[in-house]
Image (cartoon, helix red, strand yellow):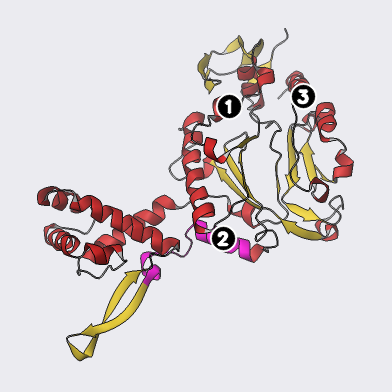
Amino acid sequence: MDARTRRYLRGRFGDHYRKTTVTPPPEPHEREWGYIPWDSGGTTMVRHNSWLDIGDLETFLADNAPQHVYFSAGRYDDPGAGSMSKKGWRSSDLVFDLDADHLPGVDPAETSYADMLAECKQALFRLLDFLEDDFGFEELTIVFSGGRGYHVHVRDGGVKELDRHHRREIVDYVLANDVDFDTLLQHESVAGIGLNNPTDKRTLDTSGGWSARVAARISAYVDDLLELDDDEALERLQELDGIGQGRAEGILNAARTNAAQIHAGNVDVHPAFLTLARSLAEKTIREETAPIDEPVTTDINRLIRLPGSIHGGSGLAVTRIERDDIAEFDPLHDAVPRTFVGSEIQVTVDEPVTVELGGGRFTVSEGTQTVPEYVGIFLMARGQAQKEKE
């Protein structure tokens, strides 16, 4: 990025901050603050700042117009101390980071930015299912990162003092680390034929956790199966690996005669039913995990982007989202700063590029082009364009 482009972006970021109110996180005086100025070339962070060092947040942002702004998940006795050992850790928010680059099946070189963000939103919904349903967390701040994904800040009283080890346990649960079908099964000896011939009954706990998730998937599959006629049901069963005609017939008969037992978590209703249960368990674990960035959640000293600031790598706003508004939230429209809407600028583009932004789709040709300012800022921030002299 050349000097003219950096100066332009810094100036327009400052204009934006002068028109915008940015709300600090809770207990801002207990947190460390960091930022990356434009004159650093985008690599050097100025950190170990206290709230007193920052001063009035709105004035600081307007005067300095940094490229990126961060605050710490941790709270400290002395957040401005020059080393972590001297800060005096008190507690930390529990922070989750979803990055579209890390999603299974997403290739940043092949997947459009819009499609990557759409996939990331689906991962966000899965993460919120864990946080709200499995853990019962209530104090959630949901944020579009301004870049490739979403952040969730958890500030329930019960999580603030968790150490790295306990945060790792939460990560392992969300990612289903070391979880498979066999580890979820509960075993119970029941009487077989004759008093001296006990058998092993295998069940899934339906009360909660990954076991309940798998049990729910199996119950839903069985309910769908029972809505079909025999031929359709047998055909559907044989679409799964390891299930041929004979096993399919056994599973269907078990489903029709033991539906109540299946809904209660029993997977031993027929020898072949275990094959179906195992297949659906693998599918559940594969599809319902949320691919969070592990080090972010386990790091009690993590610096995270300030909601309300602008992401220097996109020109989009780091945006808080109300829980009920997530489905309708469009980051490529709703996170475009209004300051940059309504005017045009000239930029020079080295290679043709297509941009979906602000509710429109723009194909920008190679060379010097006039584009809406928010499109130009997006391209310049991403290193795909340079500011042209007006």
Q: Residues within 10 Å of mark 2 (few under 14, many from 20)?
A: some
Residue type, mark 1 in image: Asp
Q: Is residue 43 above or below residue 76?
A: above
| Residue found farthest to the bottom | 196
- Give yes or no for residue 170 being in the magenta stretch: yes
Q: Position of residue 150 (x, y in %)?
A: 58, 41
Per the rendering, the mark at residue 334 is 1
Residue type, mark 3 in image: Arg
Numbered disc in front, either 3 or 2: 2
Per the rendering, the mark at residue 283 is none
Question: Which one is nearer the viewer's eye here, 14 or 154?
Answer: 154
Q: Which residues are magenta?
A: 166-185
Identify which residue is drawn at 65% across, 59% down.
159
Identify which residue is drawn at 84% across, 55% down.
83
At numbered mark 2, what does the secondary structure look like: helix, strand or loop?
Answer: helix
Q: Residues within 10 Å of mark 1 (few under 14, many from 20)?
A: some
Question: How far is disc 1 from disc 2 in space, using C-alphas?
Answer: 31 Å
Residue 45 at least partly seen: no
Name the residue beneath numbered marker 3: 10
Q: Are marks 1 and 2 in contact (CB under 8 Å)?
A: no
- Give yes or no for residue 109 being in the magenta stretch: no
Question: Which one is nearer the viewer's eye here, 35 or 79?
Answer: 79
Name the residue beneath numbered marker 2: 170
Disc nearer the start of the sequence (1/2): 2
At numbered mark 1, what does the secondary structure look like: helix, strand or loop?
Answer: helix
* Left or right: where 236 falls relative to 163: left
At numbered mark 3, what does the secondary structure look like: helix, strand or loop?
Answer: helix
Q: Would you say the magenta stretch is mainly helix, strand or loop?
A: helix
Residue type, mark 2 in image: Ile
